[in-house]
Each structure stands twice: as C-alpha cells, then as structure tokens.
Image: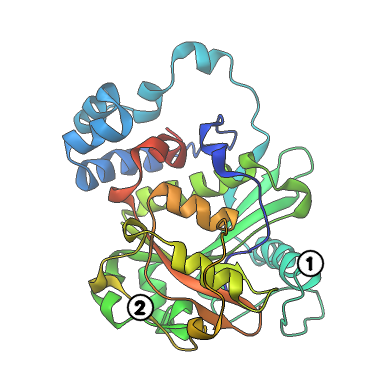
Amino acid sequence: MSDIPNPLGAFDIFNSRFEGKPFKSKKVKSSKTETIKKLFSKKLAKKLFGKKFATRARSGQNIQAAAIPEKAIAKAKRPAFQISWANSTSEIKEAQRLRYKVFAEEMGAKLPPHPENLDVDEFDTYCDHLLIRDQETLKVVGTYRVLPPHKALEIGRLYSDSEFDLTRLNHLRPKMVEVGRSCVHEDYRSGAVIMALWSGLAQYMLKHEYEIMLGCASIPMADGGHFAASLYNSLSNEQIAPVENHAFPRLPLPLDRLNGGLEVEPPPLIKGYLKLGAKICSAPAWDPDFNTADVLTMLRLSEINPRYAKHFFGA
C-alpha cells in the first residue's frame, strides 16, 4: 500500500495557482530543458505548454523565466510550503513519523511496532524522500518516497512486485521510478500541498531524465470491497493501460463476489492521477495489512494531459 485513501480535497486544484517552492539549482533547470528536448517533439511541447514555451525550450533558453511574466515575478509572495529532499537520517525520520501518524494512528493500518512511532520498511534505505514543510513552523506536512531504477536494481525489486506480477513491465524498469507512501498531515490537506508534492516529483523526474512513474494507488475497503469493485468496473477504456502493460494481482480482490455496480467517485488521489493522464494497469489487489484494494497506476511524462501539464511541472 502506498497512497492514502482518505480525502485530500477536490482535484480542481489544477486550476489554482501553484504555491510550492520551485527548485533553484541551475542544474535542475538545465536538465529540465534537456529532458523536454528528449521527451517532447516541438509539436507536442507546443501543445502542452504553448508556442513561446516550446520555442524557448527547444532553443535551450531559461524555461521558467520564459513561462512567468515579469509582473508576476514582481508580485510573487513568499511560498507557503517548502519543497526539499531528505539528506539525513533525521529528515527521513520526519517523513516516517508523519507516515506512522497517518497510516497507523489515523487509518488503523497494522504496521510493525516501533519505539519512536515511525513507519519503517526495508525500502526506505533505498528511496529518496520528498518533504513538504510548512514555511512558518518548518514541520513536515507532506511526503512521498521515490525508488529510482538503480536503487530498485540494488534491492532487487520494486515494492509493487510484492502485490503484482510485473513481468509485462520489465522492459520499462530502466526508465521507471516507483512512487509511494504518499501522505499529508490531516491539518494540511489542501490543493497547495498536493501541488507542492507533485511539483517536487515532476522536477525530480525531469532532473534525472526518467520517463515513467509507477505506484500502488489505494482504494478504501471499509465496506468490504464493494466500492473498490465498483470503481474498477467504472473505469473507461481510455483509463486502462494497453494490454501489453498489464500487471496481475498476487492476491486479487474477488470481484465476482462483490457488488460492482455502485455509482462511485474515485478517491481524490486516484482521481488526480487519472486527470493527469495516468493509466490503471491492473485489477485491484487486496492489501490485508492496510485493508485497502490497490491498483497499479502508471504515468508517462509524455502522455500527461495538456490541460494539467503546466501545473504538474510548475511551469
């Protein structure tokens, strides 16, 4: 289980102004430009970001300066949230403490006992940990963890391998990162925090020239699975991955024994993924420890919905 199923707010946040703090490293900007050149044709870049953005990206000019009017820069206010990556054991513990608070204390997940009330597993050592901090208190209020391809090779598998047979996706592993364990503090579940998290992920992908994000997205099982079955059955053909990218649950949710005809709305995080252009690669798998139904979700940067691309990339 990777993503919290509880409500985080409506996902019309894509129409809100991004309030997260963008990376300032020149290397990040340069890599972003180079990656856009590689991932997008000029025609697609124009479609996603507009004519001026596409022209300047292809010519190697500063993308963020080109995308933000001078007046907007002059009026910019101090961002409410800070985007950073954990670079010490103590910072990783801050993420693990927030995860424990959300997953164990709030959701009732069966996590291994820990003397410091931390959510810890064997993947944490190999992952990069995204942190969103409140600028006023510096408290970590949101987090994601990311397992890059070389670290997945080092540990020998993805977290998703424990829930799904990923044989059909093996050829994608060198350019694919696994994201998961996403959570937001209950006092900060707003569009701004979600956008800060996703902007951090987007900058990470562009900086390291990765193309695909994969992860287990969770559906609540409080009703015994009827909601999850109905949600899966309601997916359109456009929301399902091509058959060559399908994965297969190791512990499938028994869809044939559940009422799969209810009218349901996706949990906010899954709804957001689908709006961005992510594809569902599997039928639901049951995670007994978290009592959730997990579906494998894949998002290719080159297939992001143009309507939300600027928000996701923070352009």
Which residue is labeled 2 in the image? 247
Quadrant including the N terminus: bottom right
Front-most of residues 108 and 253: 253
Q: Does any portion of residue 151 appear in the rendered image?
A: yes
Q: How far apart are marks 1 and 2 (CA)?
A: 30 Å
Can residue 2 be seen here? The reply is no
In this rendering, position of residue 141 left or right of residue 260: right
* Residue 219 screen position, x and y as percent: 58, 68
Picture coordinates of residue 161, whole percent (x, y) = 43, 82
Q: Is residue 29 above or below residue 250?
A: above
- Furthest residue in direction bottom, as rendered: 251
Crowd tier of the residue under label 1, counting other residues whose Cα lies within 10 Å: few below 14, some 14–19, many 20 or above: few
Could you tell me residue 179's position as x and y percent? 48, 64
Answer left or right for 93 relative to 237. Answer: right
Q: Where is residue 292 in the image (x, y as percent from the top left)?
A: 61, 75
Q: Is residue 308 left or right of residue 123?
A: left
